[in-house]
Each structure stands twice: as C-alpha cells, then as structure tokens.
Image: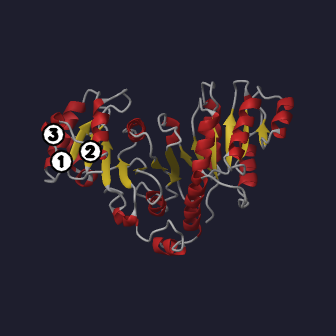
C-alpha cells in the first residue's frame, strides 16, 4: 500500500480557539489522511519547524484574526528560506478572508484558500488530489533536519510498499556513512514511555524536555511519538498540540501513526529509531500509543535503554493492578497526577506490587502539569544519570540499576 498523505494543520498566534480546524481535521482523517495537529496560538516559526520535522506535504492554516495575508506569506517565505519550499501552504478563514486577499496571498505563494461554505469533502478531495502526488526531487540545499525527516519518511514508505525485513532495509543503506547494521551501535540514549491513555505521558515528556534544555547549553533531543490508526485510514497525530516547552530548535519531534499494528508502535518504529539513535542527539524519547495490560512494547528487539511506565492513580482495584504485565517489565513506574485524592493509596499498592518482582525498579510520584514539580525533577535526575537525593532512596526503591 502507498503511504498516507501527511499534512500539518495549525491555528495562528492570536487565534484563541480551534473549533473549525478540529472539524476539518476529522474530515481529513476519514479520507485516509494523516493529520499532524499543532494546535492554536502557534507562531510562524513553530509551524515551519513542525512542518519540516514531520516532512508533511502541505500546511493547512485556519485563520480568523485578520492578519492572514502577512501570516500565510511569512510561513511560505520561511519554508523557502529553510529549503522546504516544496511544502505547500493552504487554508481558510470563514468570512475574514476576502477575494482580494486571496489574490494577494497567491502572488506570495499560498497554494489555495477555501472560502466559507466550501464543503468538507471538497477540501479533503483537494488535499488528496494535489498533495498525494510523488514529491519532485529538488536540487536546492537542505538543512540537516530536512534530510533526517525525509529519510524517516523513506523508511515509512518502504515498509508501506513492501514486507522487507529490517535487515533488508539496513543493507540497502549499508554504504551510507552514518548507517549502522545494528541498533546496538546507537550513540544516543533511548528512553521509552508507555502507559494508558490520559495518564499524562506527553505532558511529562514535555516537562523533561524543558529540564534538558535548561540544564544543557548545547545538544539536542529527539522525540518519537505514536498515535493509533488503521491500515488504509488516516490518523490524528496530536501530541504536538500539547507540547509547549518542546517548541524549540534543539528538539526534533516526529509523529508516527501505528498504521494498523497492535502494541502501541508503528511497523517502522524500529528502523526510524535506529536512524535517530545514530544521529546527533543526546537522548531519543519514544512515546507509545496509550496501552493497557499487555506486555511492554519495547521488549521486542531491545530497542530502548530505559523503560518508563506512566500510570494514573485511578487504575481500578488491586486485582487489576496484579494483571498489568507492564509493571513486571518497567524500569521506572511513575504515578502521575499524584495530586488526586487516591494517589497515596495508589503509591502504596503499586509499591507492594513492585516488591513482588524482586528486582530494582523505580517508583516516583509526579504532577506533570505543575510548574517545577519536584517529582518531575527527580525523574529527570534519574533518567539523566544524576545522583538521586537521599529522600528518594528512603522511599524504598533502588534507582541506580541503569544510568543514562
């Protein structure tokens, strides 16, 4: 099968809602399009950075604030300056964009504007017709992020069109200077995050990214985020919309759809991770789709150095806790949203459950949404290899099994 069309949608800075774009996103998904949604109140730089890293075919902007002529034009200009001028820009704005505005916007390189009253199916049809064609190979200079993003797309496309094994794909690149045959040759540290939907994995990762950026004057991290989809259908890849601190040039983020594969990861995850781990990143963070009681998705092929299970305090009864296989395999268990009423009981029950495993596992309470949360600070110290404070050691968990 051919890979789905990937587009980025966003709402500009100073627009305070996203009701229209959410409806349009759903229609695109129904037509088999993968939509990376960046959210609202986003700057030109945020949009262009995301479009390049996600290697989308086009950017769709919904604008109601009246500054559309300048904003759309700046997105087009910055894409061109970055060497990504083949990423098209389209959008709409209800009754705020006039026909005269559209004439001016098209002169500046905007591809298409949809007026109020345009049917959703017409918009989806335009995207499929104009952005589903093979990309023309340009001769212009590209930035390292563009090259990396397009190599990730190439991996996804190859797996979508054939059933070749990971080894076959790696052999085809054996002559490349930066390609290695085994993921164990990686130079980056890989940290895997998994857990049920709504536990706060994305927010927690974003807070860890903030601490990394604050503690390191140089260096970069990569985030590989997953959302569910069905083979031949579209997907809403929305983790970027909740990322605040990760809107930074030192963070490379790629959103991936599962494309019908069970277990919380994509068929291309292993190969994409191998490429990222051999690139110039200090850390690579993987976030799975929200998962249930099944085994840890990272166990296959040993693709991570450290596994983190993020849980809600409201997981149900103790019997449900006994059935969560991921508790047997995680290196660190995080009870997020520990400000909730049941959090203290949850911590005690999970601690007893981990003691049955008779191996070193970390247990940390966090409130990821809270500014400067001490639990997130301790988690960052742990995954970055810093000395864990004495108070944490007294909590009954051995945090020193793996150092990053």
Question: Height in image: 76 above or below 323?
Answer: above
Within the image, what quadrant is residue 112 found in?
top right
Horizontal relation, residue 395 to residue 56: left or right: left
Marks 2 and 3: in contact by CB < 8 Å? no
Eye-nearest disc, 3 or 2 = 3
Disc 2 versus disc 1: distance between alpha carbons?
Answer: 9 Å
Q: Residue at x 65, y 39 (%)?
A: 24
Percent of width and height locating residue 111: 78, 44
390 or 159: nearer the viewer:
390
> Which residue lies under the disc numbered 1?
354
Q: Residues within 10 Å of mark 3 (few under 14, many from 20)?
A: few
Q: Residues within 10 Å of mark 2 (few under 14, many from 20)?
A: many
Marks 1 and 2: in contact by CB < 8 Å? yes
Q: Earlier in the sequence, mark 2 or mark 1?
A: 2
Horizontal relation, residue 44 to residue 309: left or right: right
Q: Residue at x 38, y 30 (%)?
A: 369
Q: Element under label 3?
A: helix
Q: Residue at x 75, y 30 (%)?
A: 70
Horizontal relation, residue 330 to residue 199: left or right: left
Question: Height in image: 361 above or below 75?
Answer: below
Percent of width and height locating residue 179: 49, 67
Question: Height in image: 209 above or below 84?
Answer: above
Disc 3 versus disc 2: distance between alpha carbons?
Answer: 15 Å
Give the numbered dot on residue 397. Answer: none
> Which residue lies under the disc numbered 3?
393
| Colour mode of the rendering | secondary structure
Residue 136 visible in the snapshot: yes
Percent of width and height locating residue 183: 40, 65
Q: Earlier in the sequence, mark 1 or mark 3?
A: 1
> Which residue lies under the disc numbered 2?
333
303 or 187: nearer the viewer:
187
């Amino acid at each position: 099968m051919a890979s789905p069309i990937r587009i980025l949608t966003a709402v500009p800075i100073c627009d305070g809602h996203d009701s229209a774009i959410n409806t349009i996103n759903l229609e695109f998904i129904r037509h088999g399009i993968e939509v990376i949604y960046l959210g609202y109140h986003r700057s030109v730089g945020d949009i262009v950075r995301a479009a390049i890293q996600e290697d989308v075919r086009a950017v769709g902007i919904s604008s109601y604030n009246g500054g559309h002529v300048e904003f759309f034009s700046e997105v087009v200009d910055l894409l061109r300056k970055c060497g990504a001028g083949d990423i098209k820009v389209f959008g709409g704005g209800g009754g705020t964009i006039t026909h005269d505005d559209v004439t001016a916007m098209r002169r500046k390189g905007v591809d298409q504007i949809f007026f109020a009253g345009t049917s959703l199916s017409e918009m989806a049809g335009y995207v499929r017709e104009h952005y589903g064609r093979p990309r023309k190979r340009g001769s212009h200079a590209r930035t390292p992020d563009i090259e990396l993003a397009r190599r990730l797309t190439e991996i996804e496309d190859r797996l979508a069109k054939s059933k070749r094994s990971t080894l076959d794909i790696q052999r085809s690149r054996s002559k490349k200077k930066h390609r290695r045959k085994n993921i164990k040759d990686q130079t980056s540290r890989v940290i895997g995050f998994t857990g049920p939907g709504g536990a706060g994995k994305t927010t927690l990762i974003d807070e860890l990214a903030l601490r990394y950026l604050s503690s390191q004057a140089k260096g970069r991290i990569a985030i590989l985020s997953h959302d569910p989809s069905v083979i031949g259908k579209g997907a809403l890849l929305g983790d970027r919309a909740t990322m605040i601190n990760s809107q930074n040039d030192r963070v490379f983020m790629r959103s991936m759809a599962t494309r019908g594969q069970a277990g919380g990861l994509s068929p291309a995850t292993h190969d994409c991770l191998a490429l990222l781990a051999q690139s110039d990143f200090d850390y690579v963070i993987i976030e799975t789709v929200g998962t249930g009681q099944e085994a840890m998705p990272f166990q296959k092929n040993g693709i991570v150095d450290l596994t983190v299970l993020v849980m809600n305090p409201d997981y149900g009864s103790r019997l449900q806790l006994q059935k969560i296989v991921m508790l047997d395999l995680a290196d660190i268990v995080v009870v997020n949203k520990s400000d909730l009423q049941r959090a203290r009981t949850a911590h005690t029950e999970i601690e007893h459950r981990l003691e049955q495993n008779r191996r070193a596992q970390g247990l940390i309470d966090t409130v990821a949404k809270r500014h400067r949360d001490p639990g997130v600070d301790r988690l960052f110290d742990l995954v970055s290899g810093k000395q864990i404070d004495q108070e944490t050691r007294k909590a009954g968990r051995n945090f020193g099994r793996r150092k990053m």
